Image (tube, coloured by chain):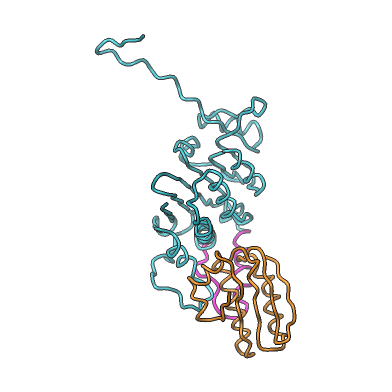
Amino acid sequence: MDYTVHTTPNGMRVALNGRMTLIDHEKFRAVVEAIERMEGQVCVFDLSSLEFVDSSGLGMFLIARDIAQPKDVEIELAGAQDTVKRILEIAKFNTLFRVTP
Amino acid sequence: MTSTLPGTPPPPLPPLPAFLVGGTLPPDELAATAIRHGLTVADPEKGEKPQIFLTALADPRQLINVLASGCRAYVERRGAADLTEDGLSRLVERPRSLHLCLTTAGTFGLDLAPLLCAAMELRGWLPPMRRGDIEICLHEALNNALIHGNLGLKEGPGGEEGAFDRFYAEIRRRLDDPDRARRRVIIDAAADAGGLCITIQDQGEGHKAHQGRSLAPPDAKSGRGIQIMRELADDVVFSDGGRRVMLIFRP
């Protein structure tokens, strides 16, 4: 998995691409640290180029949520393609995150 | 025209050609293994391609090439005394089947699910529209076999701070244990009119993760792998105390 982080007017945007699995936890820690430091109220994960996420990847999004919640930052999971969207649905992530097309 | 007198046994059938074996083991070891298992070493100069490939160490590029060439069994040696208990030719007797036998250390270094899916797609075994489902189920089953099976970690990471880091550090520590690192993960895939059946077997102590049918709470940091498999495969059957899982995908 690769990622890029951009500041936006109301927070930040993290674009993920490739395959997000257990071995990516160290890279994702850098993303979580960026959330800890961010200003603004919205962190959008752009998932349009994410090809694959496994159960460990889902756990990483939940860690990001744990960091964001005390800061009143909302996490949005945006643009997931079919394979990733299906996994988010099975995990009922729409009950925990703002999931947008 | 031939005829057989009543009461006389039919003439013996010509012997079946032995399966061809090849790989990256030292030539004398390959030859000795071939004799022991009743196989013939493939001669690349005659254009012969092995049906069974024995490798010293698993390698993704090699695995892709070997499976693309039509090979049906890929077995990693890495320090193990015996390649298989049941005989190598048994691995390829069944038509439309694929067999991978890899060590834990070898499997961990490969992103195996997409490689195996590519090989099955090449063979026309993946029902249209199911590739994504099959890949994620296979990936989760392999992770379970490695982490909860052969490496013996009973639980996934919890919700506390640094849980993923500690979990991953423990995986690396256990991969350094030679006894755990050379335990096998054995994958058998077979396609027929009833669909695709993939069996993943590990050599761990067994685990009970599959017995709880209740779903993980939505915000749990781990425990979703089996839930994903049950949701996306047509059937998921655990056996051998959790060491074997069979995934079935119907057409």
Q: Where A23 falls versus B123 (above or below)?
A: below
Q: Is residue B120 visible?
A: yes
Q: Where B186 falls versus B15 (above or below)?
A: below
Q: Is residue B150 visible?
A: no
Q: Where B247 falls versus A48 (above or below)?
A: above
What residue appears at the point 58 percent right and 30 percent down from the top-left corner? B32
Where is residue B139? Give x, y as percent.
Answer: 54, 59
Magenta stretch holds residue A66? no
What residue appears at the point 64 percent right and 90 percent down from the top-left corner? A71
Q: How many marks?
A: 0
Location of residue A84 by image quarter: bottom right
Q: Where A18 falls versus B97 (above or below)?
A: below
| The N terminus of chain B, quarter of image | top left
| Chain painted cyan | B
Where is residue B210? Give x, y as percent.
Answer: 42, 65
| Chain painted orange | A
Which residues make up the magenta segment? B150-176
What residue appears at the point 40 percent right and 19 percent down from the top-left corner? B13
What residue appears at the point 64 percent right and 76 percent down from the top-left corner? A45
